Amino acid sequence: MRRPLMLALVLSAACRNGTRVTATQAALDSADQVLIGMTHYVTQEGILRARVQADTAYFYSGTQRAELRNVHVTFYDVTGRATSTLTSKEGTHHWRTGDMQARGTVVVIRDKDGGTMRTEVMDYNQSRNQVSSDKPFVFDAPERHAKGDGFTSDPEFKNITAKRPHGTGGQFILPNQ
């Protein structure tokens, strides 16, 4: 009787020591593939719409998504001309739909004039070729400064629909107008 009790105590104590695995570690460890220095081209009907680059990509086949670290995305118009560049600390790419989400210090710089959008989270919808966020943003461009609590726009930021906007200059399309 004493021997099984002693064995149970030793095993119980052994299970309590050591490093606990966090949910983040477990999720990254379960990736089907891990790529270092990834580049992926997103096309729509044969037209290049975005080039996605990441330092590290964790691919999950079951959900058809990739978790990306140190993200760099170049957006293209229908003629294949680069229009803007996004950088963020991390992101998610759904490879079946081409949709993406960037998270953590998201910065998008427009190629033609250096106009810059800053937010913490930004979504890209490939079928609509549209970027959006429901988080506060700041947009700066020549003769234009805007802030708001969220937005929807094309990747070149020609037409921005802002939620609760405030700022100076330029034109904003207000929701339902």
Image (cartoon, grey):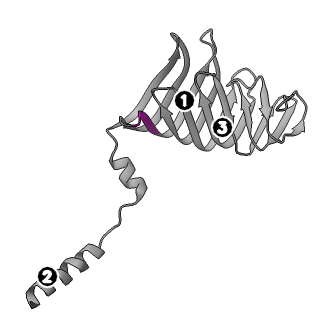
**Range drawn in magenta:** 63-67
Foreground pick, 37 / 169 = 169
Q: Which residue is mark 2?
A: 7
Left or right: residue 61 versus residue 159 is left
- Residue at 67 percent across and 25 percent down: it is 155
Q: Quadrant of the C terminus?
A: top right
Q: Which residue is mark 3?
A: 107
Q: Which residue is mark 1?
A: 99
Label 3: few (<14), some (14–19) or many (≥20) C-alpha neighbours in 10 Å = many
Secondary element at tag 1 = loop
- The numbered dot on residue 28 is none
Secondary element at tag 3 = strand
The tag earlier along the polypeptide, 3 or 1, is 1
* Residue 128 versus residue 57 in the image, above or below: above
Q: Nearer the viewer, mark 3 or mark 1?
A: 1
* Residue 82 versus residue 55 in the image, above or below: above
The tag earlier along the polypeptide, 3 or 2, is 2
Determine the CA span between mark 2 and mark 1: 53 Å
